[in-house]
Amino acid sequence: MPSRQPASRPAGPAPGSPGPRAGPSDGGMRRVATAAFAGTAIEFYDFYLYGIAAALVLNTAFFPNLSPVNGTLAALSTYAVAFVARPVGSVLFGHFGDRVGRKSVLVASLLLMGLSTVAIGLLPDYHSWGVWAPVLLVSLRLLQGIGLGGEWGGAALLAVEHAPHGRRGFYGAFPQLGPAVGFVGASGAFLVLSAVLDDAAFAAWGWRVPFVASIVLVGIGLYVRLKVSETPVFARAMAHREVSRAPVTEVLREHPREILLGCGGMTAAYLLFYTATTYCLAYGTTALGISRDTMLVASLAAVAFLVAGTWLSAVASDRYGRRPLILAGSAAAAGWGLLLFPLLDTRAPVLVLLALGGTLFLSGVVYGPMGAYLPELFPTGVRYSGASLAYNLGGILGGALPPILATRLQTSFGSFAVGWYVTAMALLSLWCVLRLPETRGRTLHQQP
C-alpha cells in the first residue's frame, strides 16, 4: 500500500510551511521561476507552432485531396490528437515525477517535445510520401502531446513546491506565463515568414523553419533546468518515505473528485484560449476573408491581454484566494461568449483585436491561479499525477474539441452558435469550481 503522509511535522520550518523564510533564498527562487517559465514557454512554443500551421497550411500540405472545409477539419483533427495524448503523458511522467522527482522528469518531457517538433519540420508532405505523410504527422503529434502532458504539472510543482507559503500564487504565475510567451514566439515566427516569403515559398518550405529552429530553444531549456535543485517538498517526502509506490492508481482511487472537478474547472481557460488563437484564426482567414497577416498581428497583440489577465489573477490569488478569481473569470466568460463573434464578424481590425483580447484576458483570469490551485488540491505523494491529470483532461474538453465543434457549428448554424457553445462551457467550469474548496491556506505537507 502507498505510504501516507504523517499528521505531525518535523521540528523547524519545513519548506512550504507558513513563515517568510520558508523555501529557498530570493536568488534561488529567481532561478526556479526562470526554469519553470523557460520550460513551459519552449514546450508551448513547440505545441502552438502546430496549431498555427494546422490553421494556415497543413490542410494543403498533408490533406490536398480534401475540400477546403474538410481539409481544415482534418488538419484540426490531427491538432486535437495531442490533447488526447496529453493525459497519457500525465500518467507516464506523473508516475515518475511522484516516484523519482520533479526535475529529472521535466528534462525528459522537454526532450520528447523538442525532438518531435523538429521531426515535424523535416517530415515530407503528401506529394512526396503519400498516405504515410499524414500517418507520421499524427504519430509525431501524439509524441508532442505525451511530452506536453508531463510538462505543466512538473513546472507548476517546481515553482509552487519551492515557494514560501503565502506566495505560491505569485511564483505559480511563472509557469502560467510560459504559454503566452510560447504563443508570441510561434505567432511571431509565422508572421515574419509570412511577411518575407510569398505564398508559394511559405507553403512549400517556409512553415517548416520554426519547427526545425526549435532545437536551439530546447538546448537553452535543458541548460536552465539542469541548474535547479529538486523541490524541498519532494525531497522531504523522500526522506520521510512518503513517496507513493503507485501514484496514478492511488490518485485515481482516492482523489477522483478533485481530478474530475479540476478538469472541468480548467475547461474555460482552455476553451477561451484555443477558440481565440486557433479557431478564430482559421475562421477569420477562411470564412471572413480577413488577411492572414491581419489575423496573425491581431492574435499576437491580443496575447498582451492574456499576460495581463494571468499575472494579475495569479498574484491576487495570494490575497483573495484562488477560487473567487477563477469563479469570476468563468462567470465573465459565460457572458463574453455572446459578444465574441458579433465583434469578429464586423471585420473591423480594432473590433477584431477587442474580440480576441477580451477572450484571452478572461482566459488568463481563469488560468493564472490554476498554477497554485491544482497542485494544492493533492497531497505530495500524488501531486504530480493528480495536478497533471486534471490539467490535461481539461485540455480534451476545452482544447481538442472546440476548434472541431466550432467549425461544424459555424458551418451549420452560423457563428452565433459558436458563441453559445463558449457560454455553455464557461458555465460548466463555473459549476465545477463551485464544488471545489479554497486551498490558499493549506500547507503543501497537509493532507487535503
Image: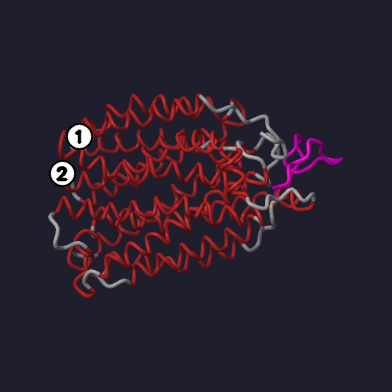
Confirm whether the magenta stretch covers residue 16: yes
Under mark 1, the amino acid is Ser
Where residue 428 sits in the image (x, y, percent)? Answer: 40, 29
Q: Residues within 10 Å of mark 1 (few under 14, many from 20)?
A: many
Q: In the rendered image of this protein, does residue 256 appear above or below residue 151?
A: above
Q: Which region of the structure is painted magenta? A: 1-27
Give the dominant element type of the magenta stretch: helix, strand or loop. loop
Where residue 124 sits in the image (x, y, percent)? Answer: 27, 73
Residue designated by label 2: 287
| Image quadrant containing the C terminus | top right
The quarter holding residue 352 reads: top left
- Inter-mark Cα distance, 1 to 2: 10 Å
Helix, strand or loop for disc 1: helix
Q: Are marks 1 and 2 in contact (CB under 8 Å)?
A: yes
Residue for point 69% across, 57% down? 229
Q: Which mark is residue 388?
A: none
Residue for point 56% across, 65% down? 222
Q: Nearer the viewer, residue 155 or 432?
A: 432
Residue for point 63% across, 46% down? 382
Q: Would residue 118 be found to the left or right of residue 72 on screen? A: right
Residue designated by label 1: 415
Under mark 2, the amino acid is Ala
Q: Residues within 10 Å of mark 2 (few under 14, many from 20)?
A: some
